[in-house]
Image: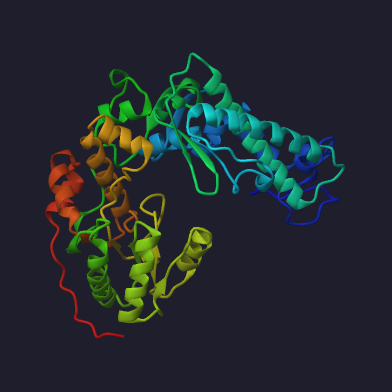
Amino acid sequence: KGNYDCIHPDVADNIPVHEAPCNLQDDFECDHKHRCPYYEDRDFAENGRFAAMTLALFLESAITGIFEDRDVIVIDEAHGLPKWAEMYGSITLGPDTVPNWNRIPTPSVNSITDAAQFAGHINAELEQTRIDLKGKPNLNPDEGAQLNETERLLRDLSWFLNEYHNSDTETEWHVSQGEDGAVTVKPINPERLLYHTLWDRGNKFALLSATILSRRSFCHEVGLNPDRVALVDIDHTFPLEHRPLYDIMQGKMTMDERDETIPDIAEAIAKVMAKHPDEKGLIHCHSYGIQDQLYAHLADIVGTSRLRDHDSANRDPALADWKRSSDPDVFLSVKMEEALDLKDDLARWQVLCKAPYPNTQDPTVDKRVNGNDDWRWYFGTTLATVMQACGRVVRSPDDWGATYVADTSFEDLFNRTRPRMPSWFREQVEAMEQPDLPQIAQH
C-alpha cells in the first residue's frame, strides 16, 4: 500500500494508501475504491492467470487469504527459503515493535512458557490499543502508522499463540531476552512452517537459484521429500574471463585475529582502489564493527574522498545514493552479498573481507552444528553465500567485474568444499591468482 497514492478527492496529494482514510477510519466507506490503483492491481493479480509479487507478500497472504492456491508457483532465489521460514516464524516483543513499551511491566523470560504468557499479556494490551485507535473518528498519520503496526503485531501474536497452544504442532523454540527486556522467539525447526504458507498452496513448483549445492540437503532444509524433487542443472552463461577471482589474502579474520589483520586488508584494498581509479567498487565488510575499522584505516591511507559507508538506519538511501553517483566511489557495505544488482558501471570490482561463516551463537546454527554435528551444512552454506556475493558485480554475459578475497580462511573454505562446487564456480576458484597491484603512497 505504501507504493500507491490515494486518489480520493478529499485527500492531499502524495498520500500513500496505507495512510488514507480507508485505513485510518474504521467506518469509512470509499466511493472511489473501484478506481483505487492499489485495489485495482491487487484484484487483477488475485484473479489473473499470472501474478508476480514478493515472496514476503505471498507468505503473508497465507494469513490474510488474499490469494488462492495456484497451479504453478515460481520462486526466484529459492536458496533463501530456510531463512524466510525462520523470519516468518520469529517474533520480537520490545521497544522497537510494541507501542507504549515503557508502560508495560517486563518480566524475566527464561522459557517458551514464560514467553507465551508474556505474549498473551502483550496481546491484551494491543487489543485495547486497537480498540482505542479504532474508536477515534479520525486518525493523524502517526496514529494511522501505529494502528497498522498494532494490527500487524496482533496477527503475529495470534499465529504464535495458536502455534504454542496447538498440541499437534512439533515446533521447537529458542527464547532470548535482551538487556532492554525485549523478548525474541525463534523456531529451531522453521522448515515445517513452509507447509501452510507455501507448499500446500500450489500443485507444482519451480525453484530457481544458482546456489543449491545439494538436492537432498536443500529438501531437508525446506521440508520437502527429495523423492518428489528433481534438480535441473544448467551451465553458466557468463565467460570465465568476465568474472575473475583474485587472491589478496592477508590473514585470518576470526574474532581473535581480526584486529591484527584488518590494517593489512585496508592496505590491500587501497592498492585495489589504485588499480581501479576510475571504477566504482564494493567492499563486503561482514559486520559493522569490521566496517568501522576498515573505514578508519582506509581514511588514513587514501583519505575519505572515495569512501562511502552506511549504518543500519540509512542502509537503503545510502546504497541508492552511491548507485546514482557517477563518481568512482567505494561503498563499504554490511550484509549485501545477495539481492543486489550492480550491473555494468554500477560496480566493476568488489572485495570480500571475511569468509561469511554462519554465526554459531544463532540457535538454529548451533543446533545444526553442535547438536547435529552438521559441519557439511555449515561449510556449504558459507560457500553458497560466497557464490552469491561473487555475482553482485557480473550480471549478464556481456558484463564483467573482478572479485578479490582478503581473508585467509577462504583458502580453507575452498579446499573443504571443492568437491561440492558447481563446475562453473570450481573453474573460477582454480583460475584464482594474485593480482598485480600498484604501490601506493600514504595519504
The picture quadrant where one finds residue 214 is top left
Q: Residue at x 39, y 58 (%)?
A: 334
Of residues 171 and 54, the one nearer the viewer is 171
What residue lies at 28% left-to-right and 18% top-to-bottom?
A: 227
Residue 287: image quadrant is: bottom left
Quadrant occupied by the N terminus = top right
Lateral position of residue 363 relative to residue 276, left or right: right
Q: Name the colour scheme.
A: rainbow
Total numbered badges shown on the rendered structure = 0
Can you give x and y, in whole percent of width and height, for residue 21 in the image?
80, 44
Residue 382's spot in the image, x, y percent? 27, 45
Q: Identify the residue at the far front of this view.
A: 108
**Foreground residue, 72 or 310?**
310
Can residue 47 be seen?
Answer: no
- Relative to 273, 153 lies left or right: right
Tell me if residue 66 comes above or below residue 12 in the rendering: above
Quadrant, the C terminus:
bottom left
- Give the x, y percent position of residue 385: 30, 47
Residue 336 pos. (x, y %): 39, 55
Above or below, 137 against 437 in this view is above
172 or 323: nearer the viewer: 172
> Outermost residue toward the top?
168
Can residue 184 be seen by looking at this rendering?
Answer: yes
Q: Residue at x 76, y 46 (%)?
A: 20
